[in-house]
Amino acid sequence: MGTIEKLEVPEYLRGENQWETEANLELFQAAQNGDIEMLKVALAKGGNPNYFSVGKDGTLHAASRNASGDAALCARELVQSGARVSAALISNRNTALHEAASFGVKEVVEVLVETSPESTELANSYGNTPLHAASAAGKPEIVKLLLENEADPNKINHRGSTALHSVSALANDSRDDPYIKIAAILLSNEKTMVDIQDINGYTPLHLAAQRGSSEMVRLLIDSGSSLTIKTGIDSKGRGGRIPEMSAQFGGFESTAQLIREFTEALGRGETVATKKMALQVLEKL
């Protein structure tokens, strides 16, 4: 007879981590409120640092979303008491670092990356890392902090998108836009690859062009984005667009004209990728 392989049951599915004891409920409430004194008392009573509420919300996750009180102290106390930083929510597989990054809780992010450096590369159910989460949420300070702690700017999610894809698809046309700032931070990182193509063959420049964000388009071209890479072609023969055509497809002729001007300048042998614009944006941060 064959044997049944024994699989490791995740922490949050183990019965003892969902027991609604008085200490566990107090611990969760303290973490949610950023109340370090109450949290210490609950731990002393036997509260489980890996407790997941019946709604499947982790205690460390709750602390990681709190931008007020002593959230960072609570997070550190929980981790030191045995909370697993890698534990993920059932709903979307977010870790506590994903939550802190999304909510922009810098002090908690600092605690989590210090105590668990590898957590910067953990992916949720969409393949998004905490860097993806912070970028999509428009949190420049968190993006900078994660990159300083060796987060990989070229990590792709299940759609083949990097953090740079995310902000390129979300940016408006102002240098004060948080997504422009995040792009500048990402592009200033020497490891960032600017022309990664997603599963549909789109580079960040294609996305910015199709959205009509001329400011993002300028930033990407100045950082070396290709003007000639084509998107993929679908089963109906649609696609195969260079960035200029993506702008036209999105209905943004002024953005298409801007890309044309860069293309013509490049054809005349002029330098279009000076890599100065990202630094100019960063100087204002």
Image (tube, rainbow, N blue to C red):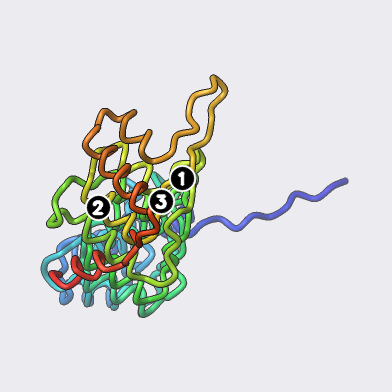
Type of amino acid under label 3:
Gly
Apparent side of residue 218 relative to residue 176 in the rendered image (left or right): right
Q: CA distance from mark 3 to mark 2?
A: 38 Å
Q: Which residue is mark 1?
A: 228
Residue 267's label in the rendered image is 3
Q: Amino acid at mark 1?
A: Thr
Q: Is residue 60 placed above or below 166 in the rendered structure?
A: below
Is there a contact, CB below 8 Å, between mark 3 and mark 2? no
Q: Position of residue 32 (x, y in %)?
A: 20, 60
Residue 95's quadrant in the figure?
Answer: bottom left
Amino acid, disc 2: Ala
Disc 2 packing (10 Å; few <14; some 14–19; many ≥20): some
Q: Nearer the viewer, mark 1 or mark 2?
A: 1
Residue 134: percent from the left, percent from the top? 29, 58
Q: Looking at the image, is mark 1 or mark 3 nearer the viewer? A: 3
Mark 3 lies on a secondary structure that is helix
Q: Is residue 56 left or right of residue 75?
A: right
| Mark 3 nearby-residue class (10 Å; few <14, some 14–19, many ≥20) | few
Give coordinates of residue 53: x percent, y percent. Answer: 32, 52
On the image, numbered disc 2 is attached to which residue? 137
Q: Provide residue 41's location: percent of width, then percent of height.
A: 21, 75
